[in-house]
Every structure is written in C-alpha cells, then in structure tokens.
Amino acid sequence: MEICIIGTGYVGLVTGTCLSDFGLEVICVDKDSEKIECLNSGRVPIYEPNLEDLIQKNVNAGRLSFTTDIEKGIKESKAIFIAVGTPPNDDNSADLTQIEKVAQQIAQHLNGYKVIVNKSTVPVGTAGKIKEIINSFSPSPLQHPFDVVSNPEFLREGSAVYDFTHPDKIVIGTTSIKALKIMQEIYRPLYLIDTPFMITNPETAELIKYACNAFLATKITFINEIANLCDKIGADVHQVARAMGLDGRISPKFLHPGPGYGGSCFPKDTRALCSIAESFGYEFQSLNAVVSANIRQRELMVEKIKRLVGKLRGKQIGILGLAFKMNTDDIRESSSIDIIKILLGEGAKIKCFDPLAMDNTKKILPDIIYCQDEYETAQGCDALVIATEWNQFRNLDLNKIKKLLKNPTFVDLRNLYEPATLKSLSFIYEGVGRK
C-alpha cells in the first residue's frame, strides 16, 4: 500500500518512517524545500533517538522518500496522512490554517478513492470540516469519493519511535467500513502484537487526544502543588508520590515534581481544550486552574533561587538543561527557558549548558553564555540550577562543582540528588518538595 504523509515535522516524520518500516511505501511531502533537501541528503532536521538510523534503513530499502511535490504524493497514494502544525491562535484555539490549505490541495488532486487521515491535534469537528473543504474545492466531488478518518498520535518526544511501534492503543475515528478496513491493514503489524484498537466516531477520537494530554498535564501539576505544600510543612514529596503511585487507581507515572510541564503538546493542548469547552458554552474550571498553576510554577522556582542567593541583579546563575525534557532538542514552552527569561528580567547573568538544545536556544537567547559542559557552567556562579533531567546531570563530581562555584548553592529543580548528600558536602541546597 502507498501512503502519503503531508508534513515532515515531528509527528509526520516519525509516522512516515515507522510506517515505511512496517513494509509500506511512504512518500513524505513538505512545502519546506530546505527541509526536504536536508532529508534527501541523509540529514535529519530534528533529534529523536533511533530515528535517523530508521530513516536511512528505509530510504535504502526504497520504501521511504521525500518530496515537495504534493500532487505526486496524493495521486500515488491510497491513504493520505495530514500531519501539519496546529499552533495556538491569540485566543488559545487551534489555528487550522495549515489543515485547511492541505485539504484544498488534496481536493484538487483526487484521482480515485482516498482515505484522508488526520494525525494533527485538532478541535472536535475538524474531520467534518476537512470533508466540507474537500467537497467544496474538488473539481468533481462525486467522481472521486473519499473518507476522512481521525487517527490521533500519542508520541512522547525522546521515545517516539518506540511509542509508535509499541503503542498502548490505536484510536481510529470513522463511520466508514471501507476506511476502517484500510486503516486496520495499515496498522496490521500492531494488531498482530495485540495492540488494542479503539474504533469510534471522528468527534470522539478528536476529543480523546486532548483528554489524554490534559489529564497528564493535570497529574503533573497536582504533584507539583503537593511538592509546594511539602516545602512549607517539611514533608518529602518523593515519599508522598511513591505512596500515591502504589495505589492501583493512580499509578506512579507522571508523579515527578519539577518546574512545570512544557513542550509542543501539553501547554498548547490544555489551553486549546479550555477554548473548545468555551466554544460549546462550558467553563472547564479544573483545567483552567492547571494552566494557571503551571505558569505559577516557573515563578515559584525563581523564588527558590532568590531565597538562596538574595537579590538577583548582578548575580551569575548557572543553568543545566534548556530542553523541556531530556532526550530532545525541543525548547518549545520549556520551563527552563521561561525561568531564564525571568532571571534575566531581574538582572541576573546566565551561563548554561544542554547536551542538545543550545543551538535552538541561541536563536531566541543569543546574549547569554553557552558553555562546553557542566563544569564550565558552574565556574564562578553564585548558584547552579538543574532545570532538565538529563542523565549526565545525575552523576556530577560534586566536590569539583563546589570548588568551581563562587558560592556552594545548588538548586535541584528535578530532584536528581538526595538532600542529605548535598548537605554532607556543605552545599546550600534546595530541591522541589524535599526540605
């Protein structure tokens, strides 16, 4: 079966590569000629573990190709996956401009029955909107029938290849038996390993994606709130979280306190779901509170730093970690970046290091100091802050760090170290919820 993926961003590139590894012939299309040229030259524009090797393997096998020719992709494929961005509008609703443009292009090049698969995260009702656009712009809508399917993605940055090939579920939103059979054939390798398939209508599938992300964001925010309370009463949030996680109704996942959630999905999707609810006349009070608490969490982390170093003006702060999480170079909505901006606004000077995300950060923060490693970052600083949970930050030479720092102040926003260990080395230490 021939598959066309429109959009070679994070979701589109992972989806197309993994489907080609299932043995399908995949054409990835993007209007960005530089990105396509990059991919055709063997380079990958994003970092994702194992993705580059998988792309090379399937390109060499002749199953995966990249082009700017959307007409070719549409006409040569039976299933067309839409994987373009849906950034937030000023009112936090999802901007569907790219979706609408792609739907118009699909309409102009239909040459037989197609399954139009929406992979992008979109508001409820978008599948119907795509269908209306294609019918409106198609030169002969009755001659070339098609179905629109909602098939949301559940990929975590840093483990997206594994998540695609070992998913906990496949959600297919369609009312068409013909489209469903084609989707089941596309995902047959996952059916053979007993992956649960959820067949719903498109509206339910569209809401499932938002509901999952919003709930996980709520869980993160809740444990952060518990950690903030632990700071005030002298309790240990790790023990609280472990006890909570042992309850089968709760589970231990996403109970890790820190500076707040970030990335390309949770911030955008929580705000978008609040906007969707509002458009239907419903105030999503709990989720609105989550969004507000997540913003406040950044500010509370800065307050921790200020309590230990005093006034920030003229102080030099070392930041370890810029990406919103480890194993990615993505700084979108990164809590680390937000914290740096607050620190700069209060007159602090910043030195920083991240294994992958410094090039991306330089584009928006060109005037801070970028270092070669953790130890250069610590040199001469009034405090060292761990902001991203990279594994290499878990095993620092603490004696060396202490000698390099101007003051032995260590702010561990990811709780990578035991407070007792830092205290025994005479550090001034603060974690999150672990007095």
Image: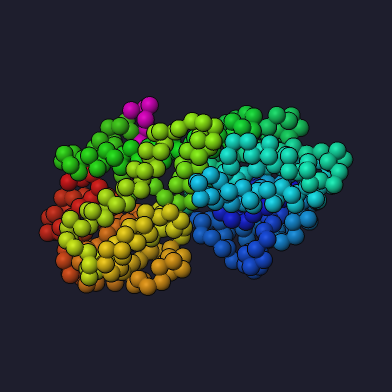
At horizontal 51% and vertical 34% (from top left) the residue drawn is: 277
- Closer to us: 90 or 299: 90
Regarding residue 275, the answer to whether it shows in the image is: yes
At horizontal 41% and vertical 71% (from top left) the residue drawn is: 366
At horizontal 87% and vertical 40% (from top left) the residue drawn is: 143
Regarding residue 260, the answer to whether it shows in the image is: no
At horizontal 64% and vertical 39% (from top left) the residue drawn is: 126
Measuring from the top left, give residue 10's x and y in whole percent: 56, 54
| Quarter of the rendering containing residue 188 | top right
- Vertical arrangement, residue 431 with respect to residue 175, above or below: below
Measuring from the top left, give residue 159's x and y in whole percent: 49, 49
- Closer to us: 350 or 356: 350
- Vertical arrangement, residue 419 with respect to residue 406, above or below: above
Residue 26 located left or right of residue 210: right
- Vertical arrangement, residue 234 with respect to residue 389, above or below: above
| Magenta-colored span | 247-256
Please name the predominant secondary structure of the magenta segment in the image. loop
- Vertical arrangement, residue 156 with respect to residue 409, above or below: above
- Closer to us: 397 or 12: 12
Measuring from the top left, give residue 377's x and y in whole percent: 29, 69
Measuring from the top left, give residue 165's x and y in whole percent: 57, 44
